[in-house]
Amino acid sequence: MARARKSAPSRARPRWTPTAWLMRWGIVAVLIVLGVIALHREVAPPKTYYMGQEERRLGRIAHDWVPMTRIAPVMARSLVAAEDANFCQHWGFDMAAIRTAIAEGSGRGASTLSQQVIKNVYLWHGRNWARKALEASLTPALETLWPKRRIVEVYLNVAEFDEGVFGIEAAAQHYFGVSAADLSAVQAARLAAVLPDPKGRSASKPTKALRNRAAGILDGAATIDRDGRAACFED
């Protein structure tokens, strides 16, 4: 008489601990974020959180996305000269500027274009440690997944240049009645000069202080063009 076979013992299913669940969903969240950043290397990001806030507050905003090929090269050089002169030489964090800011007891001047793009496109405005931590953790991913030229292109298309005026095309039309492609060197320098305080400065009605700052940016843009510091974002 044949013996009945013993059934193989069933394997116990692994139990997911809270820590395991957190790790699992943390990995999923990271992959989603990286996927979104990678997508925006080719696809224009949607309206930013801050744009939405201003649109609700004001009723409407001016914003018209343009590719880098429709932006005067001097505008890109003026932006870099004004905001991040060592843009082509760092990987998202300007350590020299950070050390200088710490020595002076101020964060002014330490934020790179890459960090500002992360803040403007994916996060929110305001000074708090949570935002700064997210900004610091996402900046290397941006630098890895996007070329430098794309970082400048996106920055110029989402930056605020006046109340309710976002992006370089809307700003060029608003202040000078020209397209972004037709900006002169002086106009580009003045637009870059308003960026630290877009609601308090005017590119078309510059104060003496803004004229002086624009003159410095004009010289800086010419300098980075001569010494090669513009090479990473130009054709």
Image (tube, rainbow, N blue to C red):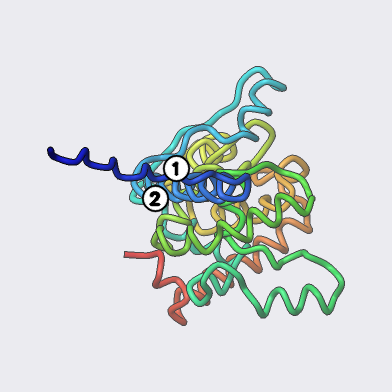
Which quadrant does the C terminus fall into? Answer: bottom left
Whether residue 159 is situated above or below residue 101 in the rendered picture: above
Residue at the image point whose x is 51% and y is 59% from the top? 185
Q: Earlier in the sequence, mark 1 or mark 2?
A: 1
Position of 225 compared to 102: left or right?
A: left
Local SS, label 2: helix
Q: Position of residue 47 (x, y in %)?
A: 52, 32
Position of 203 compared to 11: left or right?
A: right
Residue at the image point whose x is 71% and y is 55% from the top? 132
Q: Position of residue 130 (x, y in %)?
A: 73, 50
Residue occupied by mark 1:
13
Crowding at label 2, few (<14), some or many (≥20) Cα neighbours within 10 Å? some
Q: Nearer the viewer, residue 142 or 235?
A: 142
Marks 1/2 in contact by CB < 8 Å: the verdict is no
Q: CA distance from mark 1 to mark 2?
A: 36 Å
Residue occupied by mark 2:
38
Residue at the image point whose x is 67% and y is 38% from the top? 162
Q: Nearer the viewer, residue 195 or 104?
A: 104
Amino acid at the residue labelled 2: Ala
Name the residue furthest left. Answer: 1
Amino acid at the residue labelled 1: Arg
